[in-house]
Image (cartoon, rainbow, N blue to C red):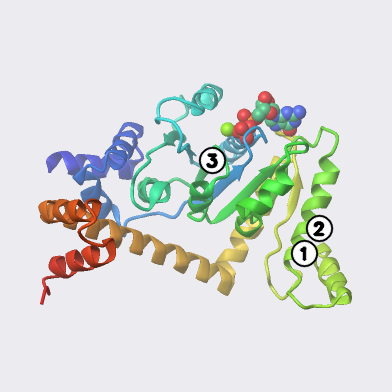
Amino acid sequence: MADLAALVQGVQRGDMRALARACRLIDERDPRAFELLKQIFGHEGSAYVIGVTGTPGAGKSTLVDGLIRLYRDQEQRVAVLAIDPTSPYSGGAILGDRIRMQQHFTDEGVFIRSIATRGHLGGLSRSTGDVLHVLHAAGFDVVILETVGVGQDELDVTRLADTTLVVMAPGLGDDIQAIKAGILEVADVFAVNKADRAGADATVQDLQQMLSLRRVPIGVSKMQGHTAVSALKRGPEAAAGEWVPPIIKTVAHRREGIEALVDAFERHREHLATTEAGRQHRERRRAAEFRAILVQALIDEVDTRFAARVSEKLEAVLEGRADPYTSAEALVREAMGDDE
Ligand SMILES: Nc1nc2c(ncn2[C@@H]2O[C@H](COP(=O)(O)OP(=O)(O)O)[C@@H](O)[C@H]2O)c(=O)[nH]1
Ligand SMILES: [Mg+2]
């Protein structure tokens, strides 16, 4: 426990080794991780959390690199969590990015870590959420969550963010994928990166088109549809305080458009801080987190205390002697202590 106290203090000081250790304990679901999370709760700062998602190759990592530099120039402390559900956290797709980001490793104001744990209930968003608490406690000003792709896990992760940036690039077939992946729903800001390439303006127009369609309620006439489009063009606060995702053109490797991006983030942050929608966003996030923690706690409890009963029931289900519904219901009753 003296060990734990030292870890808590290290985390609160923002000590890089303590942070790495805390992340490892969370990855491993070590019981000490929960003690740590309990102890730091209520002593947290509030980092501004930016989720970055989009098709592989769109330029997310290059943009994140530009963002780190800009925030560091402003003397803000930055943490980056690279979310990669497909590979173990020390390797895979992240490795290239790591090498690129190595220049930041000697900077005490930058913490970079990848998260790749699979198989946790509540998935990646759960362990990412835990790590976020640690980073808040360590007093970072900005946390960037960069996903490798745009699957459901990644979209869940971006829901942990205050602001979600969706990065697109011309010629990647982004538009169709975007609709499929529900990206329009999660995006607060769009970057159309690789604006040095042909087709960037077309990508911007496609996006504008899709956003305006989304904003027209079903059954509204074409004329009103027109109104919605022009309202969109008037800027982010156009329709009665509703946030309309701005579209920013960037050329990440030349660091063009990064200031405009950060400016859009600031406006969205302000929007969240001052509107009912922002309050609801925070409340939904906390409610979802509590449910995920509760469900995990219940499962852990059942698994440790009723391991034998769980396997008995499972066997009966596998052998076709019992149906899974009745079996699960019976187990829950037993666990709750009301098996009459
Ligand atoms: N032409 C051009 N290439 C870029 C731009 N931004 C990034 N790239 C290149 O695109 C490739 C993929 O970038 P990366 O940041 O790794 O994309 P990620 O997979 O979304 O993280 C790299 O070779 C970058 O150098 C840009 O604005 N213009
Ligand atoms: Mg990347």
The image shows residue 237, relative to residue 39, as above or below, that is: below
Quadrant of the rendering where the N terminus is positioned: top left
Question: Quick one: SS at disc 1?
Answer: helix
Disc 2 to disc 3, C-alpha distance? 26 Å
Q: Position of residue 143 (x, y in %)?
A: 49, 45
Q: Which comes sooner in the sequence, label 2 or label 3?
A: 3
Report whether the residue tagged 3 is closer than 8 Å to ligand 2: yes
Count of marks overlaid on the render: 3
Q: Which comes sooner in the sequence, label 1 or label 3?
A: 3
Foreground residue among 184 and 324: 324
Q: Quadrant of residue 148?
A: top right
Q: Alpha-carbon neighbours of circle 1 within 10 Å: few (<14), some, or many (≥20)?
A: some
Residue identifier under label 2: 209
Residue identifier under label 3: 146
Report whether the residue tagged 1 is closer than 8 Å to ligand 1: no
Task: Say which residue appears at 81% left-offset and 51% top-offset.
Answer: 206
Looking at the rendered image, the disc whose residue lies closer to the viewer, 1 or 3, is 1
Compared across the picture, whether 259 is left or right of 101 comes to right
Three-letter code for the amino acid on which mark 2 is drawn: Gln
Question: Quick one: SS at disc 2?
Answer: helix
Disc 1 to disc 2, C-alpha distance? 6 Å
Residue identifier under label 1: 213
